[in-house]
Amino acid sequence: MSVDIAEQATTHGNLIGGEWRAARGGETFDSVNPARRSEVLGHFARSSKSDVEDAVAAAVAAQPGWARTPMPGRAEVIARAGRLLEERKEDLAQLMTREMGKVLTEARGDVQEGIDMAKYMAGHGRNPVGEVVPSELRDKRCFTERVPIGVVGCITPWNFPMAIPCWKLMPALLAGNAVVFKPAEDTPLVAIRLAEILTEAGLPAGVLNLVTGYGEECGAELVEHPAIRAISFTGSVEVGHQIAATCGRLGKRVSLELGGKNAIVVTSDADLELAVDGALWGAFGTAGQRCTATSRLVVERPVLDAFTERLVARVSQLRLGDGLDPQTDVGPVINPTQLRRIHSYTEIGQKESARLLVGGSIATEGVLGEGNFYNPTVFADVRPEMRVAQEEIFGPTVVVLPADDTDEAIRIANGTRYGLSLSLYTRDLARALRAVDRLEAGIVYINAPTIGAEIQLPFGGTKWTGNGHREAGTTAFDEFTEWKTVYIDYSGRLQRAQIDTPKE
């Protein structure tokens, strides 16, 4: 069942202390369908400092009680939320396609990732959260435990409006934190539906608070607030560096998941059909709007022409359109600003003398002119130092770079400031394992594209892509907990570590 079109007229508030409230200033902003800019999905609270202060105050009040709730009890709330997400998967996926544009198949996958994360984290509710460590002294017990940080701020992007919030919220809540959640201004309605589900699942009032609005008016206030002890942010490098500087000045924990300039290396012995399949999915899935999107194709010269010819033929057949149409391969990009930015990189590539093979234009024919559509684009004759080979475009554009051999290909793949996801296609096991050792990225794929992470493994990157934290997987708790070390001496006398040693 599709989402009721009547939602277009609805005005939505912030979730603060268990209540939905209008912004204190009374202002709103709209969320629109990027496939049809005339379709308004709703009006949303344009939050400012006072709204953030209210949300943080509610979180501060609710956090101690939530932390005292036994972890299995917290896990049951998350498990119920996962079941509700599963029941409403199709409605949520259709809403997501309308709000941010990705094709329906991908939107279903986005919701499924949220479901999987809820199930995975709920399963951790009865796992150990520390370890017992032997003491060097008699009649003394030593152990560690993970404890909640307190109140954390989660700031999420629009490209995965269900999956990425679930990556952050589920472990943060399971750990016993209260959360102030600020979603991207392009996708507030999906975030509201997630908050409603968590509330329905039994989350106490004030444990999750949601404020909608713009980064400079709302997100920045959240980062600055003295009661927020940690920030988890996924977004652009520029904003991430600003947040890191603020958190460094204020002594806050900060986890950053930023950009990527990901590459697929195609070796001379690769299965070319498989490599082209991977390149198409990696470069044009979600219209290239993924931090893991394949932005570069580094191809060894013996197969360069054959690979490029097959790639261009396949790209030329991709169909643009509304993501709800089952015939659509590539949906719209998120907004007109991003549409213009993507096209500016086409102009940059041409000025740099890269050869445009296909695409390179804003799609305006017929109904496509009503939305934010960009024709899938491929550049050839690209050199590693070109801006189109170094800077994140975040759109349906991929560049092809030639390499003389695998060693040079790996050097080119590693040769950016980013280090999120890299891939290599080969039939040679030894070559594959050497590539795993040498590729400089937090995620490495062999014979698969640069997208497709699974929630039970750590996700994150190196260099400019992040600051060392990893989301999901066994590391999901790391950014939302503190280690506490406990010593219990029941000897009845003073014992000094490193000085007093047991005597026989």
Image (spheres, rainbow, N blue to C red):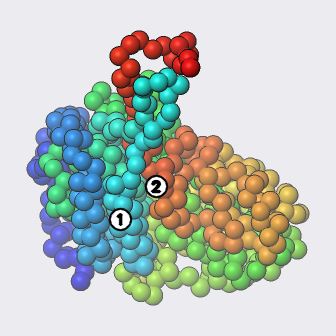
Q: Sequence order check: which comes first, mark 1 or mark 2? A: 1
- Is 333 in front, or is 460? 460
Q: In which quarter of the image is residue 299?
A: bottom right
**Which of the two marks, 1 or 2, is nearer to us in this view?**
1
* Residue shown at 42% from the left, 26% from the top: 140
Instruction: Judge whether 73 appears above or below 50 on screen.
Output: below
Which of the 4 quarters of the picture holds residue 368? bottom left
Please name the amino acid that badge 1 sits on: Lys
Quarter placement of the N terminus: bottom left
Question: Residue 13: x and y, percent?
Answer: 16, 52
Label 1 neighbourhood size at 10 Å, few (<14), some (14-19), many (20+)? many
User: Residue at coordinates 50% horizontally, 80% vertically from top-left?
Assistant: 329
Left or right for 306, reference 192: right
Camera sees residue 353: no
Rate crowding at label 2 as few (under 14), some (14 to 19) or many (20 or more) other CA atoms within 10 Å: many
Residue position marked by numbered label 2 in the rendering: 472
Is 419 on the left or on the right of 61, as rendered?
Answer: right
Which residue occupies 30% across, 27% down? Answer: 226
Q: Which of 242 and 274 is in front in this view?
A: 274
Location of residue 20 with respect to 148 vertically, above or below: below
Q: Position of residue 176 (x, y in %)?
A: 28, 44
Q: Which residue lies furthest to the bottom in this view?
A: 327
The residue nearer to you, when weighing 156 against 401, is 156
For disc 1, the marked residue is 119
Name the secondary structure under disc 1. helix
- Amino acid marked by disc 2: Ala
Badge number at residue 362: none
Task: Indicate the position of residue 110 as horizontal and vertical percent values.
Answer: 40, 68
**159 lies above or below 212:** below
Q: How many marks?
A: 2
